[in-house]
Amino acid sequence: MSIPRPIRKAVFPVAGMGTRFLPATKSIPKEMLPIVDQPLIQYAVEEALEAGLETLIFITSGRKHTISDHFDSDFELETKLTHSGKTDLLGRIKDIVPDRVDRVYVTQTEALGLGHAILCAESVIGNEPFAILLADDMVKNDGPGALSQMIGVYEQTGSSVIGVEEVPPERTSSYGIVGVQEDEAGHKSVQTMVEKPRPEDAPSNLGVIGRYVLDGSVFRYLRTIGKGSGGEIQLTDGIAAMLQDHPVLALPLEGERYDCGSRHGFIEATIKYAMDHDDIRDDMLDHMAGLLESHGRI
Ligand code: UTP
């Protein structure tokens, strides 16, 4: 195998309607909702930086500019924090993205689906392999982040890699589901991919989560697949079409995954991440113990 081309670019689609969080997402993208004190998109960007990526491509809806505002410097705020001696906070808002890392914003003029959002990045990516991170899927791991784990497998094999987790069989209709064949090295080679199948039609219980390392040839398929499930251009359909001439592996990711696109998953993640903050952990635990007691759970 020749040495695979390095993964340098990450795409963050943030142009969805976020209807499950309305009215909170009427004027801000879902990816700007905070988990404790940091927006979802910042966790995803940090994961991409940890994996060594150099270009961050945000697919935004034209109406919402808060994502670029968040990553731009805010001179006035920095000056105020400097003058008031709040150096900790200053450190947290300055240089969220290091200067050496490029940020590119591409507008998806109409929310035609995740596959369409990715297609909007084609002119920036060309035919290079690249990563996709859906910020509303969080993977919390003490060791390497989800994307680092996936790039490790890509570098070993040269194959595209999609992040998966085992899902309860009755919940397959909430996921893209892969059918896989395991080789002698333990790699799970994707044979089929189905968007939101009923449990009886699901090829396995491995659900795709929002992390992908893909060969640039996926654009060719995304251009031609047309609308799929929900009347949207689906990334899953584009990858399923690519399977005919490009190997794709499914990697069960190490870590706990939170579906922050749902209110339930979002609140679970908030509680879990709060446990990492020494200044609020004990108060939170006391509060939850009180809640459990008053609801007759302990
Ligand atoms: P979702 O399927 O979660 O849809 O998108 P959504 O619109 O964000 O949220 P709901 O279902 O209405 O509550 C998955 C990812 O794809 C992006 C979203 O921003 C999210 O990161 N996306 C989706 C786009 O960028 N453009 C689209 O046209 C659709």
Image: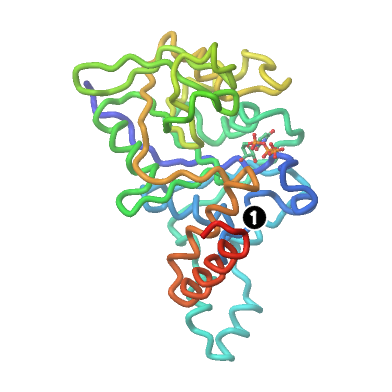
Of 286 and 202, the residue lying toward us: 286
Of 106 and 46, the residue lying toward us: 46
Please name the residue shown 54% across and 52% down the image: 268
Of 289 and 181, the residue lying toward us: 289
Q: Is residue 205 depicted above or below 72 in this figure?
A: above
Where residue 31 sits: x, y (%)?
63, 50
SS at mark 1? Answer: helix
Of 41 and 95, the residue lying toward us: 41
Where residue 183 sits: x, y (%)?
24, 16
Please name the residue shown 46% across and 25% down the image: 216
Q: Is residue 172 depicted above or below 33 in this figure?
A: above
Residue found farthest to the left: 184
Q: State how many labels appear.
A: 1
Q: Which residue is mark 1?
A: 32
Write down which quadrant ligand 1 falls in: top right
Please name the residue shown 53% across and 90% down the image: 85
Q: How many neighbours does mark 1 have within 10 angstroms: few (below 14), some (14-19), or many (20 or more)?
A: some
Q: Quadrant of the N terminus?
A: top left
